[in-house]
Image (cartoon, grey):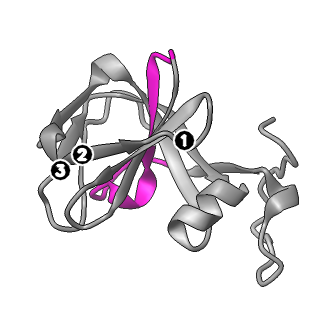
Amino acid sequence: MQKNLAVEGSCLCGKVSFTITELNRDVVVCHCKQCRKQTGHMVAATRVSDDKLLVTGSDQLTWFAASDDAKRGFCRHCGSLLFWKADNSPNTSVMAGSLESPTGLETACHIYTKYKGDYYAISDGLPQHEGTD
C-alpha cells in the first residue's frame, strides 16, 4: 500500500462522493453472510481513519444498523454500498469498488471464509481466516 496517497470515491449515481487523504489498510475481502446478502457476493474493503475521510453529499447517505455493533452506509438514491463502520470505532471501512484508480492498494487477505458461498473458490493464494484474524 502506498501511504499518503489521496483517493477519491463515489456511489454509482454520484450523489455521495468522498476524498480520503490517507488510507490505513490494504483491501480485506469479507465472505460473511451479511456482506454476501447485502452485495450479492462478497465485500472488498479498505479502511480509513475518520479524520482522513471527507464525505460530500452525506445528507444522501443512509446508515443501516446491520448488527448490534456495526452499521453500513449506502446511497439512498442508487443503493451503492459505500461504508461499513463498527460502533465507537475511529475508523471507517470503505468499499474498494467505490474508489477511483489508481488506489495504490493490494488485496491482503480473506476473512469469514467459513461463510463463503459454495459457488466459488478462493484460489488467489492469499491468507484465509475463518473469522476476522
Disc on res. 9: none
Q: Is residue 89 rendered magenta in the image?
A: yes
Q: Which mark is residue 16?
A: 3
Kind of residue at badge 3: Val
| Label 2 element class | strand
Q: Earlier in the sequence, mark 2 or mark 1?
A: 1
Looking at the rendering, in which quadrant would you find the C terminus? top right
Horizontal relation, residue 11 to residue 92: left or right = left
Q: Nearer the viewer, mark 3 or mark 2?
A: 2
Q: CA distance from mark 3 to mark 2?
A: 7 Å
Residue contact between numbered discs 3 and 1, judged by CB atoms under 8 Å:
no
| Residue type at the position of mark 2 | Leu
Label ID, residue 61: 2
Q: Position of residue 76 (x, y in %)?
A: 24, 56
Q: Which stretch is magenta? A: 88-105
Q: Earlier in the sequence, mark 3 or mark 1?
A: 3
Front-lying residue, 58 or 1: 58
Q: Regarding mark 1 in the picture, which secondary structure is present there?
A: strand
Is 4 magenta? The answer is no
> Which residue is painted at 35% across and 21% down in the image?
50
Q: Amino acid at mark 1?
A: Asp
